[in-house]
Amino acid sequence: MRDYIRTDIEIQPWSEDMADFLSALLGDIGYESFTHNAPLLTAYTYKDSWDCEAANALIADFPAPGVTLKATHTVEQGRDWNHEWEKNYFQPLVIGDKVVVRSSFHTNAPKADYEIVVDPKMAFGTGHHSTTRLMMEYLLNNSLQGLTVTDMGTGTGILAILACMLGAKEVYGIEIDSDAYANACDNAVLNSVHPRLICGDASQLSMLPKADLMLANINRNIITADIDRYRQALKEGGKLICSGFYLPDLDVIRAYAEKNRLQFNNYALDNEWVRAEFTAT
C-alpha cells in the first residue's frame, strides 16, 4: 500500500474562497484530495510523487495579500480503508431515491431500485463524496441503454458498476493505481456485473472501442492533461461528464475542452464541487 503525505495548512484570515483558491494551486503541484475545517485546509498526495520543494515554495510565496499560511507535513501509512470506514464512517447511502450504496458488512441497508455493494479498501468512490454523488445522479437521470461507457479513474468501480446495472451495452473502467484496480475487480464480483476493468492510464483508451459516454471523476490536473485523449476516445456526439474540481476550475477545464472540440453544455453543483457536461463535435 502506498503511503501518503498529509499537509495541514492554517489559513489566516480564514475564508472558504481562500481555501478553494489554495486547493486549486495545490492541485497544480500534484495534491489529489482536500478537506477543510476552519481554519485548517488538509491536502493529501502520494508520498512517492510528492514535490516537497514546490509545496513549501507555494506556502511561502502564497499570492494573496494579507493572508498568511502555516503548514505541517506528515507521512500517513497506507491503510485498509475498508476497515477504517467500517469502524468509523461508512454508512449506507441512498442516492436519487433510486440506488442504495452499502458495504458487505451492512445488514440493514434501506431498499431502493438498485443496490451497489462497495468495500472501499484503498480506493475512492462510495457515493458519500459530492463528486461521486453528482456523477451517479447523472447516470440515474439519463438513459444508458445500448451505450458504450468508459469510466476513467474508476476507483472502487462504483460508476462502472452502476452503468452496467442501468443497461449500458459495454462498460470499461480504467484505473492507474494497482490497489484500487484490484478493489474495483472485487466490487464488480460482489455486484455480479462484468465491466471490463483495466489497470493503466489514459493511453489505454486507444485500444478500446470509441465511447458514447466518457466519465472522468478525477481532478482538474489529470482532466486537463488527458482531455485530448478523452476526445479521441469519444464518438462524434458522445458525451464527456467530468467532476472532481471546484467551480473556479470550470473555466480552465472548459478552455481545454473547447480546444479539443468538446462543446460545453452545462454544469451542476454539490457543496461547491462541480459536474460538467461536454459534447464531442
Image (cartoon, rainbow, N blue to C red):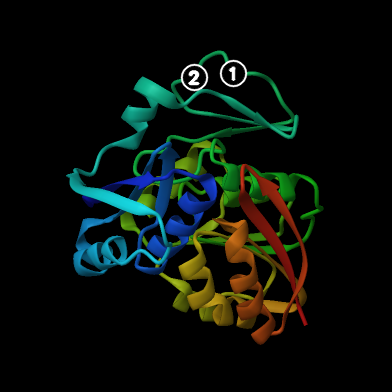
User: In the current view of this chain or complex, which residue is farthest to the top?
Assistant: 108
Bin the neighbour count of mark 1 within 10 Å (Cα to Cα): few under 14, some 14-19, many 20 and up: some
Q: Position of residue 46 (x, y in %)?
A: 27, 56
- The residue where tag 1 is placed is 109
Q: Say above or below: 117 vs 257.
A: above
Q: Name the element at disc 1.
A: loop
**Going 35% across and 68% down the picture, which residue do you hit?**
29
Residue in the foreground of this view, choosing between 173 and 192: 173
Residue in the foreground of this view, choosing between 62 and 131: 62
**Rendering quarter of residue 133:** top right
Q: Position of residue 196 (x, y in %)?
A: 53, 60
Q: Say above or below: 262 vs 145.
A: below
Residue in the foreground of this view, choosing between 262 and 103: 262
**Going 47% across and 41% down the picture, which residue do you hit?**
187
Q: Name the element at disc 2.
A: loop
Q: Position of residue 214 (x, y in %)?
A: 64, 66
* Left or right for 68, reference 17: left
**Going 63% across and 65% down the picture, which residue do you hit?**
250
Residue in the foreground of this view, choosing between 6 and 56: 56
Q: Are marks 1 and 2 in contact (CB under 8 Å)?
A: yes
- The residue where tag 2 is placed is 106
* Left or right for 119, reference 192: left
